[in-house]
Amino acid sequence: MQFRKLIAALVPALLTWQASAASSLQYDSSKPVFTFDYATTAPYTSNWVAIYPKGYNPAAADQRTQYLSWTYAPDQRGTVQVAAPNAQPGEYTAWFLAKNGFTKLAGPVAALNRGETGPVAFIVSNFTTQNAREKDAFSARVAGLVKGRLPAPTFRLVSDSSPSRWVTVGRDGVISGTPARGDRGTTTVVVGATADNGSKTTLQVTIPVAAVDAPLVDKLKVTTMNLWIGGAYVHNSHYKQVSYLASTNADVIGLQETVRPGDAGARLADALGYYHHDKGDKAILSRYPIVEALDANDAAAAVRIQLDGRDSEIIFYTAHLGYDPYGPYDFCFGNMTAAQVTAREAESGRTPQIMDISAAMAKLLPNAGRVPVFLTGDFNAPSQLDWTAATRDAHCGVGYYEWPTSKYPLAAGLKDTFRALHPNPALDPGITWSPLHPASQEPPDRIDFMYYGGKGVKPLASKPNIVGTPRFVPDQWDNEWPTDHKSFESLYQLLPSAQRKKPRQVRRRTARAV
């Protein structure tokens, strides 16, 4: 794997730990980040060097698999560089381990990744925060939008367009204040950042401001995206992920292939200043408070989000269903019958997974006029709304097929957002898989979805999306687009039943003299 070189530093400059005279591991700050010299009297082809979060120890059962990245160190003596392109600035712990296992040869060794060392820069040039409201306290963090470096830059307010000049910016990059009456509309703020090397830059921040007593959130933007093992296969993927997600102006984001809790989901939430919940290889990011994590099977994560306190809530699921065997392969390359494919869908785990998710969400639908529900994710299977007689030529000559992954959400009462707005799959296929492979290798299909439920929400727009013109695998490393799926974006109107109610205006009567 290729690797973005960052400058790293270690204090002290050279740190060595030896379990015994037999093995050693050294890290020198004069070399590229995460480059180690190792030696052992017990060489083996599967000895390896792993990078862990600071203080983690592979001897602890609950920590041993939480390594950030690793590489083999097979020789008696050598130098290795562990490729960890999305490692954020900070201190990490390295271990030299034996034979694909967790027996310690040497370690721990501390390695400090200082990140960027050139002029300070933001990942994006402009950014939109969550909504503010007149007379309500507001806070948003933009420090994570700086390209990572240590020490962190300091921040300041450069300008504030609001009539009342309500905005302040802390040195830590937190925007705060309380809009006054008359500030409704848009407040445009310019935030400055200064690095320890004296370099400076600015970020334009847009803060939508609702009128006093108006619903805080009127329209809800949702994005779902499979990150492709956290972005491991595209250069500078963190910056590209942040840039794209910021551009969507999404209020809530469902992510798949985040690797593990605390990994890509937490990293992106920190960059965007969002709340987040992660579970397995899935994460949910939200501009607005996540107040409850709901029970869901291993294929899904689910939360309750308060858009405007208890007066306006949604329930949001994101799912990453089983991937093998893959139904379109079975039809297109295996020439299997519908009955065979149906059996294999169950074998993949997708059928029981979506049945369980759909059954859980069906229980929420009676209250979905007040608390709308959403299901997003990578289902690793197409939809019966796409595989029809009219689209048979696009699907290996197969006409209608009732894919279980669409059958059960629809039967539960959920609605496919894209098909609700684009009912003709021949005219609007909405393909998300895969922009990185030719159709001869990967049958093009829509396998990433957004469903909604309840009379409290109405879809306004929905589309798959991609940035740039990505090159096919194996030439994808420098793609602007950081994954192998297209994303999906949808915009919804929250209806009055799902919004905060305006306080009743009481007319005061003037006392009359008698």
Image (cartoon, grey):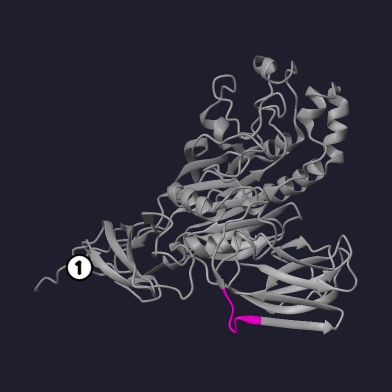
- Residue found at x 72% / y 64%: 80
From the viewer's side, name the closer residue of 324 and 104. 104
Q: Is residue 266 visible to the viewer in this orientation of the structure?
A: yes
Q: Which residue is mark 1?
A: 164
Callout 1: 10 Å neighbours few (<14), some, many (20+)?
Answer: few
Instruction: Give whichever of 227, 478 is nearer the camera.
Output: 478
Nearest the viewer among 307 and 1 is 1
Q: Is residue 281 left or right of residue 415?
A: right
Is 10 colored magenta in this rendering? yes
Picture coordinates of residue 97, whole percent (x, y): 83, 70
Residue 503 visible in rendering: no
On screen, residue 126 versus residue 314, left or right, reads left
Percent x, y for residue 60? 81, 77
Q: Main secondary structure of the magenta part?
A: loop
Q: Quadrant of residue 335?
A: top right
Give me the residue at 47% from left, 42% from top: 491
**Which quadrant would residue 509 be assigned to in this image?**
bottom left
Q: Position of residue 236 (x, y in %)?
A: 55, 53
Q: Residue at the left extreme? A: 513
Query: Above or below — where is 463 with respect to 96?
Result: above
Q: Is residue 446 left or right of residue 115?
A: right
Highlighted range, magenta: 9-14
Rendering coords of residue 457 (x, y %): 50, 44
Quadrant (top left, top right, bottom left, bottom right) of the C terminus: bottom left
Residue kind at label 1, given as amino acid type: Ser
